[in-house]
Image: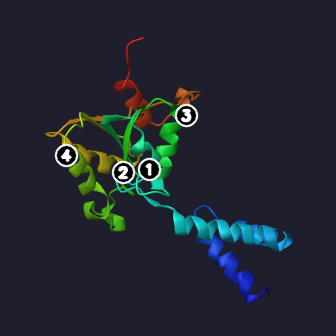
Amino acid sequence: MLSPSVDNLIAQLTRLPGIGTRTAQRLTFHLLQRSQEEALALADAIREVKERVRFCRECGNLTEQEVCSICEDPRRDRTVICVVEQPVDVISIERTAEFRGLYHVLGGSLSPIDGVDPGDLRIDELLQRVRAGGVTEVVLATNPNMTGEATANYLADRLRDRTRVTRLASGLPVGGDLEYADEVTLGRALSGRREM
């Protein structure tokens, strides 16, 4: 029904996370209704980000330089490294303004079912950073799901004798109701309780 180029754009958009066929169609028709300059500005932005953005050689975060602005910042605490799965996790933690250390982006989480083994992640680079000295604590901030927990446990085993290893607390979200909490979340909230 549609031209091959429209079908191709819809197919390419459906490859993006969270974009189904209907959303891809809406986006395609939206782009077709815009001026050529607007549509090409989007294409240029995609091209530019693919050409200019790379991974920081120190931590694996996104940057346009060799080293990201966080790793270059002399005010950061270089004795503490927060380990996350993806660069988007750095943004989430930075938004809290609570963490002043450095980061280490793994590039995913361990998942043997999906074929993701330790060699596929930036685990060796993390171990090298800790071995280089000066790191007194590694904060494991992987996602609280099955693969994130497996990754955190694997890293804790590898790091335990080299430095202090901590894990982000987990439990009930602010504004959450007890009756809707699952057993695992409620159990973690109980075990992670603190003095008031």
Q: Mark 1 points at which residue?
A: 68
Q: Which residue is drawn at 77% across and 87% down?
A: 3
Q: Which of 80 and 148 is in front in this view?
A: 80
Q: Residue at x 72, y 85 (%)?
A: 5
| Label placed on residue 132 | 4
> Are circles 3 and 2 on residues that touch, CB within 8 Å?
no
Who comes first in sequence, dot 2 or dot 4? 2
User: What's the amino acid at mark 1?
Assistant: Cys
Q: What element carries label 3?
A: helix
3D distance between C-alphas at marks 3 and 2: 37 Å
Q: Mark 2 points at which residue?
A: 59
3D distance between C-alphas at marks 2 and 4: 14 Å
User: What's the amino acid at mark 3?
Assistant: Tyr
Q: Which of 37 and 144 is in front in this view?
A: 37
List x then y, in percent, for residue 78. 31, 36
Crowd class of label 4 (few under 14; some 14 to 19; many from 20; radius 10 Å): few
Q: Which residue is drawn at 38% across and 21% down?
A: 193
List x then y, in percent, for residue 112. 30, 63
Who comes first in sequence, dot 4 or dot 3? 4
Q: Is mark 4 on a helix, strand or loop?
A: loop
Q: Name the residue under label 3.
A: 180
Q: Can residue 184 be seen in this view?
A: yes
